[in-house]
Image (spheres, rainbow, N blue to C red):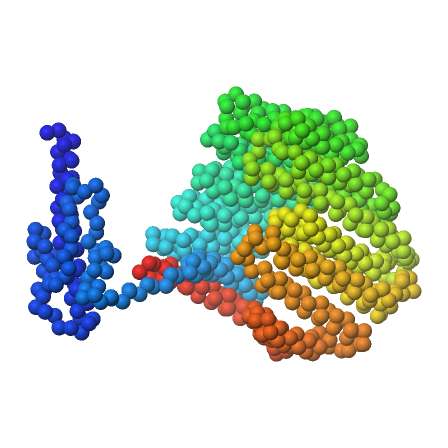
Amino acid sequence: MSELDEKIAYLQARLENLAKIQTAFGKEVRQLEYELYQLRQNQPLKNESIPKTESQINIETPISPPQTPPIQQQVPPQQQPQPPKDSYSSTTYEQSYNYQNKTAPKPEVAPVKSNIEEFIGKNLISLIGIVVLIIGVAIGAKYAIDINLITPAMRIVLGYVVAFVVLGVGVKLKPNYLNFSSVLLSGAMAMMYFLTYFAYEFYQLIPQTAAFAMMVVITAFTVAAAINFNRQVIAHIGLVGAYAVPFLLSEDSGRVAVLFSYMTIVNFGILLVSVKKFWKPLYYTSFIFTWLIFSAWMFTDYKTNEHFTLALMFLSIFFATFYLTFVSYKLIAKEEFSAEIVYLILLNSFTFYGFGYAILRESTVGAEYLGIFTVANAFIHLIVALIIHRYKLGGNINLYLPVALALTFVTIAYPVQSGGNWLTYYWTAEALFLFAVGRYKRVSIFETFAYPVMALSCAALFFDWAKIFENYNSVVTPFNNKLFFTSAFFTLVFGAICYVNFRVKSAAFVSDDLRKIVNFVITSIFLFVFYNTFRTEIGNYFHGEIVRTTVDFPPSGLNNYSNNIQDFSLKAFNFIWQINYSMLFLAALSFINLKRIKSPVFGFVNIALNTLFIAIFLIVGLYFISELRDNYLTQRFAEHFSRGAFHIGIRYISYIFAFVLIAANYLYFKAKFIRETLPDFPFDFFFDCGFYFTILWILSSELLNILDIFAVADSYKLGLSILWGIYALGLIVIGIYKRKKHLRIGAIVLFAITLAKLFFYDIADLGTISKTIVFVSLGILLLIVAFLYNKFKDLIFGDN
């Protein structure tokens, strides 16, 4: 007999023995079930034999309760094709409980715990707790600083002691409570970051170099802990702390080289960790923080004569780091670029080119090399394309994307070098030409090539918009200026692109999901530019009026700081009319979509924008309307500027635009194509909440307007309270009549707010010590609750 046959025979014998033991246990279970059933029926046992213990069971002799219906003997496993049925099955259970044709009660099933409760108990409470605890420690430290309770060195030492205690507890709890310990450890790291900053910035206890080194060590430990704990939350805390260093420790622009070098090291470390652990959100966050910090420095501290070389060097390092990361991530695995990778490569490339273009243009010497810089960008992407082609890394999109970028930069090199106001015209027309040829001639590379050119044309137009008020005292004639003609041309061209996009099917190699996104982006750009073309002209008109009506005073006139005044009412009218125009524009889009297009995606975006601008009207628009009322009532500077009844009447025109927009949302919520998209979504509930809240806000504003006109004192107190009480009563009546529970609950909440306003309007805030005690105590209590949730999670959220 071979070794394989011996092993098969051994396993077969074990299987047969286990099957016999299973049969014996099943019979014992049925015996116990029968006896339990007799006891529940209050019947005396009939001389049944007491079940034998495990040691007494004879697996050869079946044990059956008297008068129990015969149960089919199990066949040994080797004689049946399927695995043996567990004798303690639902069928056996029902047979024993249906003895004497009596049905036993069904066992009670414990209610299933809500996933929301589990998330709050095991995760959210601990996060809130550690944040509240950190805030409490910070408030306590500030109080100690204010009253000089202890020496500065001791304050920092005590802070580190607290951080290390939290760190130790987190490490101690790791084997049994991994999630909870991860939160504790990340909180300890955050405390150490800020304590190091306090020691450097507030007390000068350590020099900048030492603080820099300590934060590098903290960052390294955080990264190592994230790998060891395998938890992203630790890595993200470390990442935020690491990228906070340039802001926390930068004394002046002379040390920016050290800070950017530190960022480069952090980028390499964090990105390697994220690639190893496949934590893509981590290196997305790294990408965003790096460019945000660089952008902030460029817009605030950059000086061409001091930082020209430095800025170009680190700009290139950051660009190369992220370009290699995004490309290598897919190329090593020979996978095709996903949509998110394509977007990141494009964003990284154009961010680099945009900053590089700005740096070179501001330099007298660098401006001569803008064309060479553009060609260098093309060369970089061409090298990537050649490497992909040589080693056949991934699919077609991996090759076509860098090729398209290279061609894009090659074609714009000459216009960039020669300059001129017609650059936006050139790129916009080129985008239309490439896109139309790509669609009509079915040449995918032309269509792909058109997308970066579209991005460049958008960037050029936005740059033109940004320059409109470089000279604040300049006056631009509305609808008769270069910017309006450029914007109108751009709008017409992108309208043609949208027409081709919806009439001719795409020939590009992009996926369906990416194609949908591209369609949405193109349409959004067209609508945004169309909207902004006319909105800008409203601003041009009022800006011209403000400059034209400015009143000059001699230096010893109105005040010591300014020799001219401008009409604030014109500024208020400017904002109000731009908001009115926005509401009218969105309402027109809503009715077009409701009657003609009937696109659910466009509809939901339209609803969101409608809601946003209603909120802007309530918060910003009504504020400026109230300022116009005050200017009219006080007649301030009336000798210089017009103060008429339209300062009051403009509010009612704005109400009309607002209610038209509300009506558009109402029709959307009733539209069939919207409701069919989300059949279970509570549209009526959300509309009621928004509608009645808007009505309350407008009524409150109108009441304050009337009370101010009639010079009623304390209008913010008694008048509003009475109005809110009456409105709440009306909501209850409507809620009862229409059987809408949420309106009644909302009315009760409004009553509670009104009462709270009456009783606590003038109550002072808590003191510093009280705040410290509350925050620290609440933080500790929340952490204890989170610990208990984690310790007894099986009892709370388990199946049994």
Q: Is residue 749 above or below residue 657?
A: below
Res. 793 in view: yes
In terms of image quadrants, where is residue 691? Answer: bottom right
Q: Residue 328: x, y in percent?
A: 51, 31
The residue closer to the viewer here, 467 or 598, is 598
Q: Residue 373: horizontal and vertical position, in percent?
A: 68, 28
Q: Is residue 637 above or below residue 722?
A: above
Q: Tally the numbered discs.
A: 0
Question: Is residue 747 shown to the viewer in this render?
Answer: no
567 and 446: which is toward the camera: 446
Give me the residue at 34% from left, 52% from top: 175
The x, y position of residue 13, in whole percent, is 12, 41
Q: Look at 34% across and 58% down and name the residue there.
A: 798
Name the residue at 82% across, 40% down. 485
Instruction: Give how far across and how far down residue 190 sits, in percent.
Output: 50, 53
Q: Nearer the viewer, residue 352 or 172?
A: 352
Residue depicted at 14% across the width and 32% down the height: 5
Quadrant of res 64: bottom left
Q: Quadrant of the C terminus?
A: bottom left
The quadrant in which the N terminus is found is top left
Q: Residue furthest top?
A: 390
Quadrant hosting residue 116: bottom left
